[in-house]
Amino acid sequence: MSESLGRILEKQRHSLGRSLAEAEADTKIRRRLLSALEQGEYEALPSPAYVKGYIISYARFLRLDPAPLVELYEEEIGQTGPITAPRLPDEVITPRHQGQQLPWRTALAIIAVVLVIGTIIWGISQAVRKPESPPPIPTAGETTSAPEPSVEPTAPGETETSSTPEGDATQPAKPFTLRVVIASDSASWLRVTVDGLTAYEGTMAGGQEREWQVAEEASVRIGKPTAVTVYRDDLEVEIPGGDPPTVVLSATD
């Protein structure tokens, strides 16, 4: 191809009469990233692993074959082969509940102040409390004995029943298989955590699928939920809301 990747994308978009706003709404990729891709401003884009996912989604929106465009991108940046350790893409927004959390240093300082105040109040209350009078000494001849527990006789033929409550047993963990499938006409960034370890982080192209064996707990953070289907032992799992949404599965559920 004699033309640059950005020129091919921009020319095709103009020929279809589509705007960057329409492309953003369809691909879920932010407009400034699509503009940087068309202008060849690769330094403004995240790691190549994510950019390849952008190219695949954008090419399908523009009715182009994504494979030669990905190859052209690799030639332009002088890089081929798989890309590892990608950084978090810019279009992923920090969950709202995380943004409201206190820094751990501030939290520790607050806890320390509360403990100091509580200790001071307890010390003052002990200082002003009147000494309690000792219990009376029993006189000679008085004895104390613990009351004997009363046992009701059982009728003939009846058996004693245990008072131990039933149903308190902890639900045992049941390992399961986690499977993620990407729609054939799309792509999505994923972060998969299995039993406390990051099992996968990257962009899966259309038609791809992966699975993991889970012993305790797994979570799947999804960049484009409309392109992803999550299964637990071949049963489809509902993807909750959120930005980005996260599916959490436990072996004790």
Image (cartoon, rainbow, N blue to C red):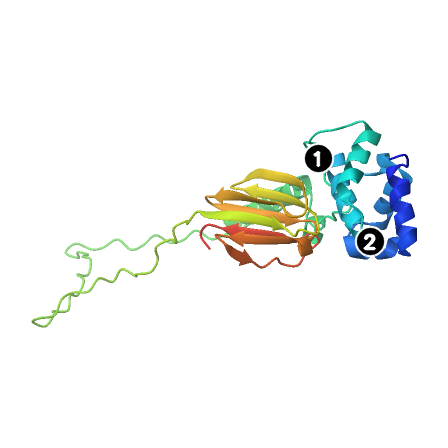
Q: Which mark is residue 24?
A: 2
- Label 2 crowd bin: few (<14), some (14–19), many (20+), radius 10 Å: some
Secondary-structure class at tag 2: helix
Amino acid beneath label 2: Glu
Secondary-structure class at tag 1: loop
Residue in front for this viewpoint, 147 or 82: 82
Is residue 42 positioned above or below 220 on the image? Answer: above
Q: Give the distance between the C-alpha atoms of the residues marked 1 and 2, in whole angstroms.
A: 22 Å
Residue 22 placement: quadrant:
bottom right
Amino acid beneath label 1: Pro
Proximity of marks 1 and 2: CB atoms separated by less than 8 Å: no
Residue found at x 29% / y 55%:
136
Residue found at x 51% / y 53%:
232
- Label 1 crowd bin: few (<14), some (14–19), many (20+), radius 10 Å: some
Residue found at x 78% / y 38%:
68
Looking at the rendered structure, the number of numbered marks drawn on it comes to: 2
The quadrant the N terminus occupies is top right
* Residue placed under numbered mark 1 in the picture: 86
Q: Judge left or right: residue 225 versus residue 63.
A: left
Residue in front for this viewpoint, 178 or 197: 178
Q: Which mark is residue 124?
A: none
Is residue 48 positioned above or below 210 on the image? Answer: above
Give x and y (percent) for residue 142. Answer: 17, 57
Residue in front for this viewpoint, 202 or 169: 202
